[in-house]
Image (tube, rainbow, N blue to C red):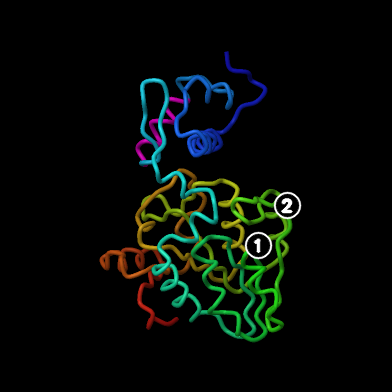
Amino acid sequence: MVSKEKIISPVKRREVILKNLKNHNSILTQDIAKEVNASEITVRRDLSRLEEKGLLVRTRSGAVKNAVIDDFFAYDDKINQRNEEKDYICRIAAKFIFPGDIIFVDCGSTVSLLVPYIREIESLTVITNSLPITSNLINFSNIKIILIGGEVDNKRKAIYGYSAVRNISQYHANKAFIGADGISLSNGITSYNEESASVTFKMAENSDRAFLLCDSSKVEKNSFVKFAPLSAIDYLITDGGVDSSLINKYAENNINLICDPDHYI
């Protein structure tokens, strides 16, 4: 029987499932049910939802790992993937950053590649939860860095948690540069992780204009944490691999989809 004392949300249950698969390659339904304090029927439903998204392969007794899971959690894993596309996106994004700007910079592997393009900008204030971004900008006297306080996640090399979200609420930026694991016209902006989603959403909320930076493989794709509507962002910057027909569709939702380096505000 499931205890009523420790009920875990669906999002948290599914994150536990993915972390277990990352570490052990396969899982048993009964083991996960005990860990998340849920019935085996509930866990099977979670497994079905994750299988629909291509995140695992179900078996009779549980599930086995889909190789894509390795990409979800560790910063070091993600930073070395699709580098050309990420660099292309950041070169475009940097065109929208000017001297005197105050900007939020998220901790995603795409957004982190902004650093080479902004470190010479005068009187720039960068508010971030990313340890690598802080480290790479700390020696530039022209840039004021505000590092968000909270709990450090050593794998993601970033700061999360309630304190981080509350800390972000104390600041306002004229622009936010954020990442996500998926964006679609039907489901808005999605993430694989609830904690990072909370930080990302608060950055967008506390800025005048929000720029979502994500490669074309994430456009019209959904993850399992829906954390923000399309209206939370003003610009979607991606690479040339995106379907050109989407430009008008996103414009109808008041989002400027940019995949051309010669496109300016």
Write the start and end of the magenta stretch as one range.
43-53
- The amino acid type found where label 1 is placed reads Leu
Residue at image x 37%, y 29%?
58
Say if mark 2 contacts mark 1, CB within 8 Å: no
- The amino acid type found where label 2 is placed reads Ser
Q: CA distance from mark 2 to mark 1?
A: 16 Å
Circle 2 is placed at which residue position? Answer: 163
Residue at image x 42%, y 69%?
237
Circle 1 is placed at which residue position? Answer: 131
**Horizontal and vertical percent for residue 125?**
67, 76
Disc 2 crowd, CA 10 A, few/some/many (<14, 14-19, 20+) = some
**Horizontal and vertical percent for residue 131?**
65, 62
Magenta stretch holds residue 74: no
Label located before the other in sequence (2 or 1): 1
SS for callout 2 = helix
**Horizontal and vertical percent for residue 223?**
43, 47
| Above-or-below relation of 119 to 36 | below
The image quarter in which residue 85 lies: bottom left
